[in-house]
């Protein structure tokens, strides 16, 4: 019987097939061989059709290469169903991300980015307080049009779609980020490093971004307080009084980064430094590498933001007439964080209700921290020993 050879290539989609016969005339095939060859052809045809349909599934697509070896994918379980809210047409995750960014971007291709997981997406929790601060802040409501919420799990994505216009579903294959990620656990570290790598990809796509943790309340438009000439500017847990002083203690929960060659190379260096400092999270590693001569050789213009405008529970903004953002940093546990964020929002509402003369004359202060007690605050020691709260600081 003449052999029939089936060559399958599983390296890329679409899959290619080849049927090869000996160099003989088709008429030389015996009558018993012909039906068998036809059966093989028919089986292969069915197999090709099945694989062709599967090739359109998001399981076969990756949005972009990742320097960590993971890939970004949308949630397959949200696709194809009657209630699916993620568009199924398009060229994979990269195109979906590009579409969301383009719709949300300012004229100069700047977007505001916040990440969200299930623990912070539940009703009456962090995401609700976060969005409320934009709505009641001074000059901040319009910034919601430029906010992209990046959901790290399926429930967070569904909640985002209920609350906001610009949502992107992002998952790291092999890791589950839906629960509250406790400080310095494996899941916490992976979430922080994947987030950093994702932000690097935005810079490579040509987008500037303001990254904000969702436990940061936006009370005023921060853009007038940013440095015009800086490539990378970041909020601080503790501010020395000098925006150029690398001894400042930055908090990567809030930063404004411009897309250019310097910032892209900086983010690549920052990410790759996790191998130099294993077991540390990205903020600790930033505190190490900010002294590295490589940063100076890049020509990167780094600035540290004054806590008078960009405060937090570590070092609160003292003047409510100046504050732009307040961060629930230096705080353990979701319940404590929610309690103090609620007090923070109420203090802001009380301030807004005062007559203009009283706003300027009275020394109005925050009533926080409360449940986020001072026992939870950072210590002024080496980065590796700093005390932080759960994910989103």
Image: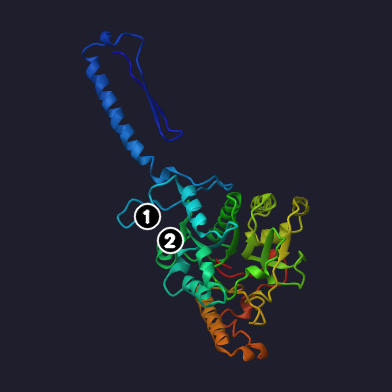
Which x, y percent locates residue 166? 47, 61
Along the viewing direction, whichever of 38 and 234 lies nearer the viewer: 234
Is 366 displayed left or right of 78 in the figure?
A: right
Question: What residue did someone put label 1 on?
Answer: 78
Q: Quadrant of residue 245?
A: bottom right
Q: Distance between the residues labelled 1 and 2?
A: 10 Å
Along the viewing direction, whichever of 288 and 100 lies nearer the viewer: 100
Is 234 displayed left or right of 119 in the figure?
A: right
Which x, y percent locates residue 375? 63, 78
Q: Is mark 1 on a helix, strand or loop?
A: helix
In the depicted structure, whether residue 198 falls above or below residue 368:
above
Q: What element carries label 2?
A: helix
Q: Which mark is residue 157?
A: 2
Which x, y percent locates residue 365? 63, 86
In the depicted structure, whether residue 22 falls above or below residue 232:
above
Asked whether the residues under the numbered discs 1 and 2 touch, taking CB atoms below 8 Å apart as contact, a structural biologist would say: yes
Please tell me which residue is depicted at 33% across the width and 32% down the height of the picture. Answer: 48
């Amino acid at each position: 019987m003449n052999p029939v050879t089936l060559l399958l290539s599983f390296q890329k989609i679409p899959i290619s097939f080849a049927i090869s016969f000996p160099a003989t005339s088709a008429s030389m095939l015996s009558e018993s061989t012909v039906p068998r060859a036809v059966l093989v052809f028919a089986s292969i045809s069915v197999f090709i059709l099945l694989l062709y349909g599967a090739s359109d599934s998001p399981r076969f697509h990756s949005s972009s290469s990742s320097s960590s070896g993971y890939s970004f994918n949308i949630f397959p379980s949200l696709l194809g169903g009657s209630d699916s809210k993620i568009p199924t047409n398009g060229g994979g995750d990269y195109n979906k991300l590009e579409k969301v960014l383009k719709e949300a971007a300012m004229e100069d291709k700047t977007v505001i980015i916040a990440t969200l997981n299930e623990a912070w997406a539940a009703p009456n929790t962090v995401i609700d307080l976060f969005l409320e601060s934009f709505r009641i802040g001074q000059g901040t409501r319009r910034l919601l049009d430029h906010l992209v919420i990046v959901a790290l799990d399926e429930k967070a994505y569904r909640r985002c779609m209920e609350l906001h216009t610009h949502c992107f579903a992002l998952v790291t294959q092999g890791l589950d980020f839906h629960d509250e990620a406790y400080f310095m656990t494996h899941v916490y570290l992976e979430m922080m490093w994947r987030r950093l790598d994702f932000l690097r990809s935005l810079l490579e796509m040509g987008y500037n971004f303001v990254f904000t943790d969702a436990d940061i309340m936006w009370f005023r438009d921060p853009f007038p307080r940013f440095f015009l000439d800086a490539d990378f500017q970041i909020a601080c847990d503790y501010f020395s009084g000098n925006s150029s002083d690398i001894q400042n203690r930055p908090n990567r929960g809030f930063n404004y980064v411009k897309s250019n060659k310097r910032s892209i190379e900086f983010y690549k260096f920052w990410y790759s430094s996790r191998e130099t400092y294993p077991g540390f999270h990205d903020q600790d590693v930033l505190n190490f590498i900010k002294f590295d001569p490589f940063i100076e050789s890049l020509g990167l213009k780094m600035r540290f933001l004054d806590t008078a405008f960009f405060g937090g529970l570590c070092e609160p903004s003292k003047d409510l007439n100046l504050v732009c953002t307040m961060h629930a940093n230096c705080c353990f546990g979701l319940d404590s964080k929610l309690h103090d964020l609620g007090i923070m929002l109420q203090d802001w509402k009380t301030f807004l209700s005062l007559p203009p003369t009283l706003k300027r004359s009275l020394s109005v202060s925050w009533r926080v921290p409360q449940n986020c007690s001072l026992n939870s605050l950072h210590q002024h020691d080496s980065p590796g020993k700093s005390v932080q709260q759960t994910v989103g600081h």
